[in-house]
Amino acid sequence: MATAVEDVGVRKPKNELDSAKIGRKSNKKNRRSHYVPKFCCFRSDFDSPSIDTKNEDGSIDMVSASAGKHRTPSHLIIMVNGILGSAKDWGYAAKQFLKAYPEDVVVHCSEENSSTLTFDGVDVMGGRLAKEVLSAIERYPDVRKISFIGHSLGGLIARYAIARLYGRNCLQLFSNENGGLGNYGSTKSFLEEDYKDKVAGLEPINFITLASPHLGSRGHKQVPMFCGIHTLEKVARQTSGLLGRTGKHLFLTDSDDGKPPLLLRMVNDYDDLPFISALQSFKRRIVYANVHFDNIVGWSTASLCHPKELRERRRHLSRNDKYRHIVNVETENSVNALDGYPSESIIDDWKTFDTEAMMEVMLRGLTKLNWERVDVKFNGNKQRLFAHCTIQVTRYWNQSNGADVIQHMVDNFLLSRPLVISMAFLLISSLTQEILLAEGRLMTEAIWIVKEGRENMTMARSLIGSRPPRCERRCRGCGHCEAIQVPISPQLKLKPARSHSAPTTQFSRGDDLSNYMPMSWKCKCGHFIFNP
């Protein structure tokens, strides 16, 4: 009787089915990760874990998670956002600084001038930032160095703030706001000598701006979105009040109590505010500027360069192998034929200036200081449309091309060590140098001995009983001749050896006591060597 067999296939064990499902899931995950970009929200730490503290004013203090293990951070970095920006705009850049200098820096991302508060005017925002910096120093009393990094309008805000914090102005600011020195005075020495050439009582190191309109937005093609059309530029100047006092400052239409425009005043020490002296106190001043595709801030105003010079600079643009979006780096200013800073009397005659004359005065004042200029160019991708924010990497997921610009800024950041560490380093270097010099002298002597040869060492052991050298003055007659024994390999004679005698040669005296080593005369001057 035939039996019907149903072909149901071979059933797999349960554990094999589970492993197969896991394999399919992992393959799907790998395929998904291949297509889905790594957005900023999925990379919150950017490979650098940090401790972020949000303060009462909304600002953010960022310290590396590994800070304090070996030493306390001594360098305070103040990051200032641009118009309509916030402290979060510096998330990526701050992480890169903490990653590079985990035990050296504290990063403070300013929040006092965020969102619509950026319309209140450069002077008002600069005053807020100055107070915010003092508060940050109170929280970190061990810091000794300070640097500022400003994006767009933040560069102008930082320039005003450092004038309020420079020298004894810092003491006046804190005293006026608090009715005295308060807690700040308990941690700092308030001798004026301690604040000379310092910003907020700290040593100023780096002043860096990214796409900042240092010459304002009034000049021709200073705002690229107007396409160089004079009518649009004129309308923008007349309606600058729509952006509040900030708009008037940028387009140089402000006139507080009959004073010159603020940006014009900020190119000299004016009205008891040392704008230029404060800038000059920094060891480095760097401007990053977009060559193209920045629709808000033009190349000229961001790089502190006259528009007529841009054509020549354009010829020298070239790609950098390491930082592919950086096309030009200048470490020194171009020669400025005009001498001296524009005086207050010249600035007070601003009503007679046209736009071109105002730019000349501002350039004359600012370029008397040495600036490092870095030109940036984003092209070949869609992110160039957001070049003004891409240079800062405001949002990593759609502005990641600016990462190499941030890396360039981090790599060239001047980081001064604390004085104690510097002194220790110098002491160790000095001791090491002395040791190396001593070892070098010993090594030189050793090399000289080796150079003389093994025969010379053998000769030195058999000098007893040898004929003493005699100078016969056969050299140049310089009076410096001397007799030295130049090693000459003796020719050994084969004869029965005796236990009490030394080996003999054809130069032996025959008394079996010592060998006669042949002599040569050598002038001390080293000109002649000959046999007697």
Image: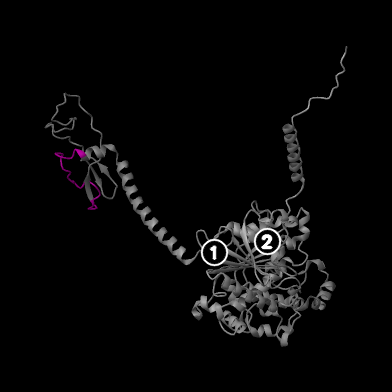
Which image quarter: residue 85? bottom right
Label 1 residue SS? loop
Question: Viewed as shown, does residue 169 lie left or right of 509?
Answer: right
Q: Is residue 273 visible?
A: yes
Residue 346, compared with residue 144, is above or below; it is below
Q: Residues within 10 Å of mark 2 (few under 14, many from 20)?
A: many
Amino acid at the residue labelled 2: Gly
Number of numbered discs visible in the structure rendering: 2
Which image quarter: residue 303? bottom right
Where residue 178 appears, as percent x and y from the top left, is: 60, 82
Q: Determine the main secondary structure of the stretch shown in magenta.
A: loop
Which badge, 2 or 1, comes first in the chain's sequence? Answer: 1
Residue at the image point whose x is 81% and y is 68% from the top: 228
Residue at the image point whose x is 54% and y is 71% from the top: 141
Q: Residues within 10 Å of mark 1 (few under 14, many from 20)?
A: many
Between the C-alphas of marks 2 and 1, the distance is: 19 Å
Which image quarter: residue 250? bottom right
Residue 19, compared with residue 245, is above or below; it is above
Amino acid at the residue labelled 1: Pro
Q: Is residue 365 visible?
A: no
Q: Nearer the viewer, residue 452 or 280?
A: 280
Determine which of the numbered discs, if any, sits on residue 91 in the image. Answer: 2
Point out the stretch of residues depicted in magenta. Answer: 461-480
Residue 118 in the magenta stretch? The answer is: no
Question: Viewed as shown, does residue 526 lie left or right of 317?
Answer: left
Residue under label 1: 73
Q: Nearer the viewer, residue 427 or 304?
A: 427
Q: Name the quarter where the N terminus is drawn.
A: top right
Where residue 221 appears, as percent x and y from the top left, is: 77, 69
Residue at the image point whose x is 41% and y is 59% from the top: 428
Label 2 residue SS? helix
